[in-house]
Amino acid sequence: MKHLKAIIASIALFVMFAGTTVQAKVEIQWWHAFGGRLGELLDEQVNKFNASQNKYTVVHTRKGNYSETLNAGIAAFRAGQHPNILMVFEVGTASLMAAKGAYVPMYQLMKDAGQSFNPNGFVSAVSGYYTTTDGKMLSMPYNSSTPVLWVNKDLMKKAGLDPEMDLSTWKRVGNALDAAKAKGIDMPFCTCWHSWVHLENFSAYHNIPFATKANGFAGLDTELSFNSPVHIKHIQTLGKWSQEGKFKYMGRRNEAGKNFRAGECMLMTESSAGYAGIKKEAKFEFGIRHLPYYGATEAPQNTIIGGSSLWALSGKSKEENKATAAFLAFLSKTDIQAKWHQDTGYLGVTTAAAKKTKSSGFYKANPGTDLAGVQMMRNKVTQNSKGLRLGSFDQIRGIIDEEMEGVYNGSKTAQVALDNAVRRGNVLLRRFERANK
Amino acid sequence: MEKRVFFKGWWLPALLVAPQLLISFVFFFYPSGQAIWNSLFLPDPFGLKTEFVGLDNFRFLLSDPYYLASFKTTVIFSTAVSVSSMALGLYLAALADRLIKGAGVYQTLLIWPYAIAPAIAGVLWLFMFNGNIGLASYYLKALGYEWNHTLKGDQAMFLVILASSWGRISYNFLFFLAGLQAIPKSIIEAAAIDGASFWKRFGTIVIPLLSPITFFLLVVNIVYAFFDTFGVIHTITSGGPEQSTTILVYKVFSDGFVSQDLGSSAAQSVILLVLVGILTVIQFKYIERKVHY
């Protein structure tokens, strides 16, 4: 009996102490969209932060894919149940920016919390996306990638091709696909994120506008313009390849990545961040190449980013905002950034992280991993290659997806599909302008 | 033949009707009123500001050819789901009704799929027809048939109809079986003695006697196909490709909860409300007359 009393007393004591320590810590919520390998790496970052100090605890929750996470965040905001930090993919940036009052701008958050924070430490091609025209950083770049061409070298050999052959232009890619098809390769080409790669990045890469008003950076009265002859030519080519069985469309997001990792697809256009999964799963020799372009003489412009940034949502206590600021400052540390860059294939978003990675000899040991960075920063950005800032863009992407599916299955020409997408997208842009003026 | 009961005073009848009125108000009139009210506004996604736009949301919708096309998609989808699941349900019920041994086992197994939530059913079927790992798509490919529902609208439509009907077959089976068992055996035996064949008996005795149940199931199945199937569609196709599987209620869901366009979503709800109202009136006014109770 005495024994039991002692046990109860010690449990009670333990609970009391455990209770007080938990109470003393400020807990903040982070909603994100990462599962699989990326989810593990994110979890590692959070654990590292939680272990590094004893004032704050970050709790992270996966809310589905990028769109679902954004929508969960918005719905929760309306209900007053929103997290401290919300991961928003680049497509949702304009929607967040327009919702003044829904977030605490990054520069403000850091200043209020007294965190030393240097927005100039970020690569400008990345931070420019999340910064207002007067130079105020609104959200914190988290993961940024850019599309590259992934090559299954084993399948190239099987197709009787030199795995190191020049694949810098779409014409050369076309020749390789012809050869692969002739040798009976079932899936010579596949792509992830087709609007992002084949229209958005395509525009920047060829230095042609995706939308007027500097792709929306210069005003809400922007109009889509991705139905130019060059765009049409490319989408028509994809349609032709699809009809001929050289290009297999697997879905709107990164579904095709599965086929590539399983060794079924020979050439794939996908984010540079496909690296984490491919490196882990591919049982074949793979290579990374620059995104192909049109024209043999003119060198391409730069590609633009995809990925997400972290927004500090408003309506939280000062203490919690402090915790948020501390965590975000932690994430922007050089060693965290460098590790993230090397593990995932996302770009090193701070200059210091890129430098550190280079000096560590990582690029030499893993050829091709530096291509994405080079491709993004190879030229001085033009107003066509700075990025996109379009409202309701998640919906517009949905429209583009639908229309392009019509080209792939042969029900419409690229001209009709892109004209439709532009017209339907413009209606949404006007609706967005009206709701946010 | 109608029976009428008269109450003295008014408080007892009022009290008896009150719970029903309260439920109708809370679950029908209040949300419908909200939908109508919201359909007149254009709010931003975060609910920070809103603008009164009158009937602009409706004008916006009715000028969208894809919205108009989704009416047609809805008719095709609802008809296919209702007819196929009812026909199969009736067929299986007729078979199970004639069973002498092991009827209970068959009946239980046939009812089983009804226990599965629409979204889960969607995932199950999607798994089988998945272009990467699906068994069904693998065998179809072996037979030389290219299956890719992410690209081919008719395949996508077939798949969502299949997944939506599957669970409903059980439900319809259950009701039809009960209906069949309620038909007095003596009538059928009398017809058999008179020399009527199985099909003759089925067509002239069973079908008319089943008509109240068939009518009930028709109404319930159409309501199901109209409103309860967006989980299936969301998991399998998300309305694609090219909106070929975007039925009206899925568009309400996707514009409202995926695209955060609450004004348009509310306007669509109002249109759907009116549509289903009209449909119900038609069903009860014209089709119910052919029903023998």
Image (cartoon, rainbow, N blue to C red):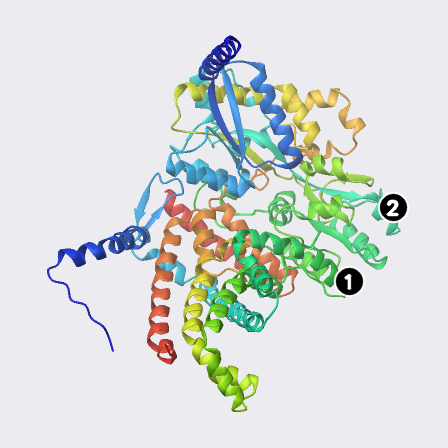
User: Residue B255: x percent and y percent?
Assistant: 45, 52
The residue located at (39%, 39%) in the rendering is: B46
User: Residue B59: x percent and y percent?
Assistant: 36, 60
In the picture, measured across the screen, residue A382 lies left or right of residue A10, that is: right
Q: Residues within 10 Å of mark 2 (few under 14, many from 20)?
A: few
The residue located at (48%, 67%) in the rendering is: B78
Tell me which chain the residue with mark 1 is part of: B
Determine whether B240 is above or below B200 in the image.
above
Determine whether A358 is above or below A128 in the image.
above
The residue located at (31%, 55%) in the rendering is: B28
- In the picture of the structure, the residue carrying the numbered disc 2 is A162
In the picture, measured across the screen, residue B245 lies left or right of residue A430, that is: right
Determine whether A193 is above or below A51 in the image.
below
User: Which mark identifies residue B204?
Assistant: none
Q: Helix, strand or loop at disc 2? A: loop
User: Given the image, on which type of amino acid does mark 1 rest?
Assistant: Ala
Query: Of residues A241 and B95, which is closer to you in this image?
Result: B95
Determine whether A24 is above or below B14 in the image.
above
Mark 2 to mark 1 CA distance (whole Å)? 31 Å
Mark 2 vs mark 1: give the one in front.
1
Query: Of residues A203 and B38, which is closer to you in this image?
Result: B38
Residue with the most extreme left position = B9
